Amino acid sequence: MGRLERYRCLQELYSSHANENLISKEKYKLNLGGITISGPSGTGKTTLARLAAERYQIPNQRNIKIGDLMRKAQNKQKEEGAIERPLNLDEQMDQSQRTLIQQATINEPFILEGRLSGFITKQEREKNPNLPVISILLTASYNKSIERIKKRNPSMTENEIAQKSAERAANDLQIWRGIHPELNDPYNPAYYDIIINTDSLNPQEVLEHIHNELLQRGKVKN
């Protein structure tokens, strides 16, 4: 590679980082009551929730992660002697999400990350078609999901990750169907307003895709 070509590559790299930094500093506000983010493990839900909260100036207490709440509640119950995950814990989490979605207002927007959040939003929208909530589904291929999960758990083999993920998905679905008999697939596209496959996108690109969709729908403002 010649000197001029190297210089151009460096310029492009600098420009790319500059643009990313500029984009990340732009601040907007949601012109709706909330966003729900759902999807299987390894699709980028948590990172998207964090980036969206930064972009739309959502305070930490309104950036709600059901997985974190479940883990805290389960740890507390284990300390109290519970062996298995009680069914009423999932029911409580569902009701918490339902209440938040029902009371959604543009004055106090939220971001809700939960695997059943889109399904619950769909149920509530059947009662109130004007519900000011947008539901987002993130998807990824099997291999990409395993790859991302392994980055968070480097000590686990891909086979161990695959087995654990499959067991967790089957167990969760069994519990959820005990509460929602009509639920066959929490990631049914019919439940969602925006669906993004994240295989070839980095987290910032996923956010930009969603941001552009919300801009077109008039759901964000400066």
Image (cartoon, rainbow, N blue to C red):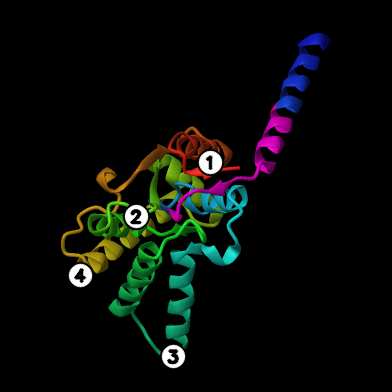
Which residue occupies the extreme right position in the image? 3
Q: Secondary structure at mark 1?
A: helix
User: What's the amino acid at mark 2?
Assistant: Leu
Q: Circle 1 sits on which residue?
A: 207
Q: Nearer the viewer, residue 113 or 57?
A: 57
Residue that appears at 34% across and 66% down: 98
How much space separates mark 3 and mark 4, taking CA atoms?
Answer: 24 Å
Q: Secondary structure at mark 4?
A: helix
- In the drawing, what numbered circle is on residue 131? 2
Q: Nearer the viewer, residue 60 or 87?
A: 60
User: What's the amino acid at mark 4?
Assistant: Gly
Magenta-span inclusion, residue 25: yes
How much space separates mark 3 and mark 1, taking CA atoms?
Answer: 40 Å
Q: Nearer the viewer, mark 3 or mark 4?
A: 4
**In the image: residue 93, left or right of residue 5:** left
**In the image: residue 33, left or right of residue 15:** left
Which residue occupies the extreme bottom position in the image? 80
Instruction: Magenta stretch: give its range.
Output: 16-35
Q: Secondary structure at mark 2?
A: loop
- In the drawing, what numbered circle is on residue 80? 3
User: What's the amino acid at mark 3?
Assistant: Glu
Q: Circle 4 sits on which residue?
A: 178
Q: Nearer the viewer, mark 1 or mark 2?
A: 2
How much space separates mark 1 and mark 2, taking CA atoms?
Answer: 22 Å
Mark 2 nearby-residue class (10 Å; few <14, some 14–19, many ≥20): many
Q: Nearer the viewer, residue 161 or 119?
A: 119
